[in-house]
């Protein structure tokens, strides 16, 4: 079984890593501002559900495959970076002409549950969190049960932690009802999303 010390350390790691800035949280806040909390809810649930499944699959074998195949993590990192650049471009070019009525905006849509869940696999921060959680906190003696325990802790903490960013975004939506303000915010959010790639790029250059 997971000791109290390990459980506490895991819970703290899950909270800190889930609530600090990263691609998921930046995109959730942006979605909250652009679309409101109700339309962002599937995105929130997709992040939490997708990441929980990611931890389970990594713990049940994907981590061993990555360790066995040279260069696989580098490939994943590069692919993730390219996709995040694409998402930054999408955010920066979002149509803000109907900032006061996004329900009527056909071109601008929030992430669906499935899109948010799949996004975890191209999110560098999610990979780092999942690999660290499994390697550092999953009780080796418990096998797949240990993996599920780690996933359960993250599943319970990740949703309210990341959801906080969507709520903050929704609270600021009235201020960003002006198309110019919203466009400015989206551009800043896109720049921050690109900036979040710095640790990944630095890691690749250091190899």
Image (cartoon, rainbow, N blue to C red):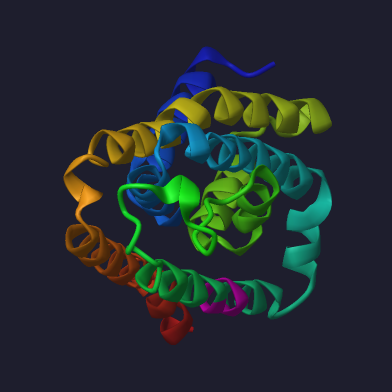
Classified by dominant secondary structure, the portion drawn in magenta counts as helix
Q: Is residue 172 left or right of residue 13?
A: left
Q: How many marks?
A: 0
State the residue in front, 117 or 144.
117
Q: Is residue 5 above or below residue 122?
A: above
- At 38% from the left and 38% from the top, the residue drawn is 166
Residue at x 70%, y 48% (from the top left corner): 114
Q: Residue at x 42, y 45 (%)?
A: 35
Q: Tell me: 175 left or right of 92.
A: left
Q: Residue at x 61, y 64 (%)?
A: 122
Q: Position of residue 158 (x, y in %)?
A: 50, 32
Instruction: Name the image quarter holding the N terminus.
Output: top right
Q: Is residue 2 magenta?
A: no
- On the rendered structure, is 86 left or right of 94? right
Above/below status of 93 relative to 160: below
Q: Which residues are magenta?
A: 78-82
Tell me where residue 189 appears, x and y as whole percent: 30, 62
Residue 13 in sight in this render: no
Q: Position of residue 183 (x, y in %)?
A: 26, 65
Image coordinates of residue 159 in percent, x first then y, are 51, 30
Q: Is residue 80 magenta?
A: yes
Work out whether 196 lies above or below 203: above
Residue 136 lies in quadrant? top right
Return the residue nearer the eye: 167 or 81.
Answer: 167
Q: Is residue 40 or residue 28 the one in the foreground?
A: 40
Q: Is residue 108 visible?
A: yes
Up/down of 77 relative to 43, above or below: below
């Amino acid at each position: 079984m997971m000791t109290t010390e390990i459980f506490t350390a895991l819970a703290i790691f899950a909270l800190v890593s889930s609530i600090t800035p990263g691609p998921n949280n930046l995109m959730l806040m942006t979605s909250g501002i652009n679309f409101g909390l109700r339309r962002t809810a599937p995105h929130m649930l997709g992040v939490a559900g997708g990441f929980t499944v990611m931890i389970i699959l990594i713990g049940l074998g994907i981590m061993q495959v990555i360790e066995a195949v040279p260069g696989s993590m580098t490939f994943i990192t590069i692919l993730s970076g390219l996709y995040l650049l694409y998402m930054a471009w999408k955010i920066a070019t979002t149509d803000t002409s109907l900032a006061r009525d996004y329900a009527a905006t056909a071109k601008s849509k929030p992430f669906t549950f499935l899109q948010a869940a799949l996004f975890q696999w191209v999110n560098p921060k999610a990979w780092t969190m999942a690999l660290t959680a499994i390697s550092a906190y999953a009780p080796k003696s418990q096998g797949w049960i240990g993996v599920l325990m780690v996933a359960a802790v993250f599943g319970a903490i990740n949703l309210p932690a990341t959801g906080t960013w969507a709520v903050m975004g929704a609270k600021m939506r009235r201020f960003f009802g002006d198309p110019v303000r919203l466009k400015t915010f989206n551009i800043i959010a896109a720049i921050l999303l690109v900036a979040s790639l710095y640790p990944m790029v630095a890691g690749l250059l250091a190899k």
